[in-house]
Image (tube, rainbow, N blue to C red):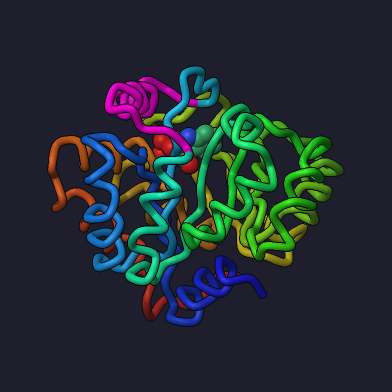
Amino acid sequence: MTTLQQAIEETKIAGNKAFVPYIMAGDGGLETLKPTILKLQQMGVTAIEVGIPFTDPVADGPTIEQAGERALAEGVTLRKVLEALASFKEEIRVPLVVMTYFNPVLAFGLEAFAKACVAGGVKGLIVPDVPLEESEILRDTLNPHGIDIVQLVSLTSPPTRIARIAAASQGFVYAVTVNGITGARTSFANDLSDHFAHLREASNIPVLAGFGISTPEQVVSMGALSDGVIVGSAIVTALHEGNLEKIEALVSASTSFSGCPNIR
Ligand SMILES: O=P(O)(O)OC[C@@H](O)[C@@H](O)c1c[nH]c2ccccc12
C-alpha cells in the first residue's frame, strides 16, 4: 500500500472520511507555502493537493484560475515550488500530491522532475491533461521513485472505461462529481449514488470525490458516497481571505462520520 493510500485508509479505520484540501502554491507569495501546509496539517487534513500555477489551466474555473494568476505574478514556477517543499520536507507529515498540467513537467524534463519531487517529499501526482491512454510514461518515470499517479474519472465515463481508470489509478481514484471545470457549486446531479457505488465496486483503492464541494453540508453528503473529499476553490478563497474558521468547519465535517456504521 502506498503512503497516500495508507493515509486515506487510516481515516477510514478511525471512522472518518478523508479530507484533502487543494491549495494554489504561491498564492500570496511563495513564502506562504510553508505556513499554509503546516497549518492545514495541524488542522488534521488527510493529504494536501499542491497546485502549480499555469498560464492555460483548462480544467479550472475562475477561482483557481485567478489564484494561479496571482501566483504567476509572484514569479512562482514548478521548480520553485518543489525547491520550497524540499526546504521544509522534514516538517511535512501528510502526503503531498502535486497537481500540474503536463507542459511544465515536459519543460522540466521527466526524470529531473521525478528527482525534484522526491527531494520535495511529494507522494503523488495529478496531471489532468494527460489521459489514461497517455499516462504510462508518468507511471514509468514516477513509480520507481515511490510517487503515485492519480487518475480522474468523469461522470460521463462508460463502465468499461471506469474499470480501466480504477485499475490504473494509484493512491486513490479521483471521482469528478460534476461535468465541467473546478469551482464551488450550489447543487449536484441527484443520481450520483449509483455512479459512486459502481466506482467503488470497480476500485480496490479508495475513491475520493472532488469538484464543486464548498460547504460542510456538501462534505457530508459527498463523504457519505465516497471515502472522502477534495475541496479546492472553497479552500483557495478561504486562504485568500484569511478565513481559517471556514477551513476548520470543512475539515470537521469530514470527521462527523465517527460512530456511524461505515457504509462501505
Ligand atoms: O475547486 P473545486 O471545485 O473544489 O475542485 C477541486 C479542485 O480544485 C482540485 O482538485 C483541482 C484544481 N485544479 C484541478 C484540475 C483538474 C483536476 C482537479 C483540480
* Position above or below: 185 against 167: above
In the picture, the quarter occupied by the C terminus is bottom right
Is residue 182 in sight in this rendering? yes
The prevailing secondary structure element of the residues shown in magenta is: helix
In the picture, the quarter occupied by the N terminus is bottom right
Along the line of sight, the residue nearer the viewer: 193 or 10: 10
* Position above or below: 208 against 60: below
Image location of residue 140, percent across then percent down: 79, 52
Q: Residue at x 62, y 58 (%)?
A: 172
Image location of residue 218, percent across then percent down: 37, 47
Q: State the extent of the magenta-drawn residues as a range.
A: 60-78
Determine if the magenta segment contains residue 132. no
**Left or right: where 242 falls relative to 172:** left
**Left or right: where 64 falls relative to 13:** left
Q: Which corner quadrant of the image does residue 171 belong to?
A: bottom right
Q: Residue at x 39, y 54 (%)?
A: 85
Image location of residue 39, percent across then percent down: 23, 60
Is residue 198 in sight in this rendering? no
**Left or right: where 147 falls relative to 93:** right
Q: Residue at x 82, y 41 (%)?
A: 161
